[in-house]
Amino acid sequence: MSEHLGELIEVNDDNYFTKTGHFSNSFIKSWNTCAFSTTCRDNTFNKNFFIGHYVEALICGDDASKVLNREDYKEHVNKAGGDPYKWVTDCDVYSNRVLKDKEFMKYINHPASKTQVILTGVIGGLNFKCAIDLLNLEGLTSTSKMPFILDLKTTKDGLKKSVWVEREGRNKKVSFIEAWGYHYQLAIYRELVRQNYDVVCDVFIGAIQKTLPTNFDIIDLTPAFDFDFLLKEVEVMAKKVDYEIKMNIVSKCGTCDDCVSAKKTKGAISYEEHLAGLE
Ligand SMILES: [Zn+2]
């Protein structure tokens, strides 16, 4: 296995966010955004990721102080020059708002709901891992027996604002779910649950907006997407990344901090090239 993914080892709570030899949705997304930047860091840690984990821990009743005190996180926070205690200032307000919502918490507090379920499996011949925020293999009620996956997402303004993305050469307005590739992430979760438990889950996103007052929703994606088709797209993306890793094709986006830090000019550029680089 490559230096970018690491040697294949068993995944657990302590090493999940390190190189374990597995593909994941975030690795594929990161590689496709900027392969060079992906090779510059050990994981996809950033401030939003940290806040997301903290809010999830508060809502799921896990020990949130563990998020603040994880050694691997501390190292990244120090590198980013941040203060984790300041980062999580409003997190109690977001989570308390959700904790008071009976319908939302029915999913979380159900006796069969398990938090932070780590699973591995094989997709398109490649090793994958995922950490599912909430997995319930029994279903919510006696009349709704469908097992389900609930993924908690903290979002800046995703419950109100659409995002313009380029699809097949055209600009299209989509929700934050598609803009950030969460539908692919859930297709991976659904498949790894199927491989490990032989059940096909309904798929929900619990979205929590990082605003005051806090907006939030549980969004049922089950009928909205063809998850078998999305899984095929994941296979194609993963095989492309696997090929690039094997052939040592590490492309640069040219605009991220890592690319700018490693930039070398090749002499003067034209004014047109300068204009083309403007956001
Ligand atoms: Zn880059």
Image: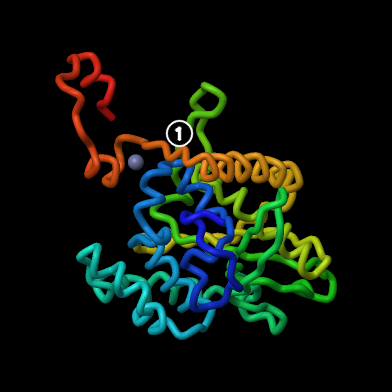
Q: Nearer the viewer, residue 174 or 133?
A: 133
Residue at image x 27%, y 25%? 277
Q: Is 50 located above or below residue 123 in the figure?
A: below
Image quarter in which the C terminus is found? top left
Query: x and y percent of residue 260 in the render?
Result: 24, 40
User: Is residue 102 visible in this depiction of the protein?
Assistant: no
Please give left or right for residue 46 compared with residue 248 in the image.
left
Q: Is 125 located above or below residue 174 in the figure?
A: below
Please give left or right for residue 11 compared with residue 50 in the image.
right
Quarter holding residue 95 = bottom left
Quarter holding residue 269 = top left
Query: x and y percent of residue 131 in the render?
Result: 58, 68
- Disc 1 marks a residue whose amino acid type is Trp
Query: Residue most toward the left?
Result: 268
Residue at image x 53%, y 38%? 174
Residue at image x 42%, y 61%? 43
Q: Secondary structure at mark 1?
A: strand
Please give left or right for residue 122 compared with residue 270 in the image.
right
User: Is residue 198 visible in this depiction of the protein?
Assistant: yes
User: Ligand 1 quadrant?
Assistant: top left
Residue at image x 40%, y 61%? 42
Image quarter in which the N terminus is found? bottom right
Q: Dot 1 corresponds to which residue?
A: 164
* Ligand 1 neighbours mark 1 (CB distance < 8 Å): no
